[in-house]
Image: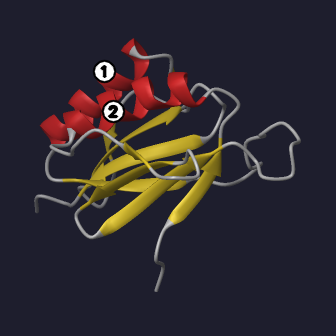
Amino acid sequence: MFTHVMIGSNDLEQAKGFYDATFAALGGAPGETDARGRLIYAHGGSRLMITKPIDGNPATAANGGTIGIAAASRDHVLAWHEAGTAHGGAAIESPPAERPNGSFVAYLRDPDGNKLTARSQPTR
């Protein structure tokens, strides 16, 4: 259904450090910069793109929006959360935990305030 998710950043260098670390924790590659200066992360058939807003106004985080990122295992979720907090992200909502349906989730805000979650599939 979706080709990609695009979010804004006010500091692409800081965003690259955060996203390179969190995607490496999930087994992904560092982001690439396209001709327009946007960061592009491709992993598991999906793409996340980060850019400075084209209208010249500051980037802001979506109120109520969350970007969900698939993780292969509980260990990947924990590594993602640790990499994110070590690279300018903030832990939010609750500590990484198993949900009643058996999935394992963690939540972060990236350095620009965008809300992210990494989730592994239920093991039951």
What residue is disc 1 on? Answer: 82
Left or right: where 46 falls relative to 109: left
Left or right: where 57 falls relative to 82: right
- Residue shown at 15%/53% (left/top)? 72
Given residues 77 and 5, the one toward you in this image is 5
- Residue shown at 78%/52% (left/top)? 54
Residue farthest front in this picture: 35
Given residues 83 and 30, the one toward you in this image is 30
Residue 76 in sight: yes
CA gap between label 2 and label 1 equals: 13 Å
Q: Earlier in the sequence, mark 2 or mark 1?
A: 2
The circle on residue 20 is 2
Given residues 33 and 120, the one toward you in this image is 33
Rendered location of residue 10, percent (x, y) = 71, 30
Could you tell me the amino acid type at mark 2? Asp
For residue 110, which quarter of the picture? top right
Could you tell me the amino acid type at mark 1? Glu
Q: Looking at the image, is 76 positioned above or below residue 11? A: below
- Residue shown at 38%/13% (left/top)? 86
The circle on residue 7 is none
Give the number of the mark in front: 2 or 1: 2
For residue 24, which quarter of the picture? top left
